[in-house]
Structures are given as C-alpha cells and as structure tokens.
Amino acid sequence: MSKVFKIRPKRIKRVNGTVLTPDMEVIVTTKIHTQNPFYNGAAEIREQYMRIYGFDYKKACCYPTDFTFEIID
C-alpha cells in the first residue's frame, strides 16, 4: 500500500548552480506505506524533481529539513 505526499521547499536555496524555490511543489507517491516521504534516501522525490523541473536534488545537497510535506489521502 502506498501513500501520497505534497512536498514544498521551505525557502529559496541556491547551491552548485541549482536553484530551488518554494513554488517548486511536487506530489509524490511512495512505494510503501510510510509517514515520511524521505524514508529511502528520497528516491521518489529526486525522480519527481528531475522529471518535472530538471532539478538535481543530490547536486543541490538537499536535506529533509529543507522541505515541508503533507499527507494527501
């Protein structure tokens, strides 16, 4: 069973030539039932940001504390 999360950056972040802004919101479906979308190294989140915005989560050195998330049922 999976869960759906809406993930939004807390602030503007400029690192290594990448820019993350609060309006870069994504909706992610996790592969397992969990309360935290960052449970597996944020694999689903990295994929969504790369697919939608061309934003490299790893290159920007993002951490779970850079984001807020809410569970969507």
Image: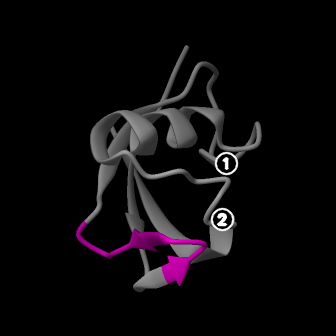
Q: Is residue 21 magenta?
A: yes
Asked whether the residues under the numbered discs 2 and 1 touch, taking CB atoms below 8 Å apart as contact, a structural biologist would say: yes
- The image shows residue 44 at horizontal and vertical percentages of 55, 32
Horizontal and vertical percent position of residue 65: 65, 75
Q: Looking at the picture, how far across and down is residue 39, in whole percent?
A: 74, 42
The residue closer to the viewer here, 54 or 24, is: 54
Q: Nearer the viewer, residue 17 or 57?
A: 17
Disc on res. 38:
1
Quadrant housing the C terminus: top left
Instruction: Residue under label 2, please give it.
Output: 64
Q: In which quarter of the image is the N terminus?
A: top right
Q: Could you tell me the amino acid type at mark 2? A: Pro
Q: Looking at the image, which residue is at 43% across and 40% down?
A: 50
The type of residue carrying mark 1 is Phe
Depth check, front residue: 26 or 1: 26
SS for tag 1?
loop
Magenta span of residues: 14-23
The quadrant holding residue 62 is: bottom right
* Quadrant position of residue 19: bottom left
On the rendered structure, is 71 left or right of 40?
A: left
In this view, the residue farthest toward the left is: 23
| As drawn, 64 above or below 14 | above
User: Any magenta on residue 33?
Assistant: no
Q: Can residue 61 be seen in this view?
A: yes
Q: Distance between the residues labelled 2 and 1?
A: 7 Å
Note whether 34 is above or below 13 in the view shown. Answer: above
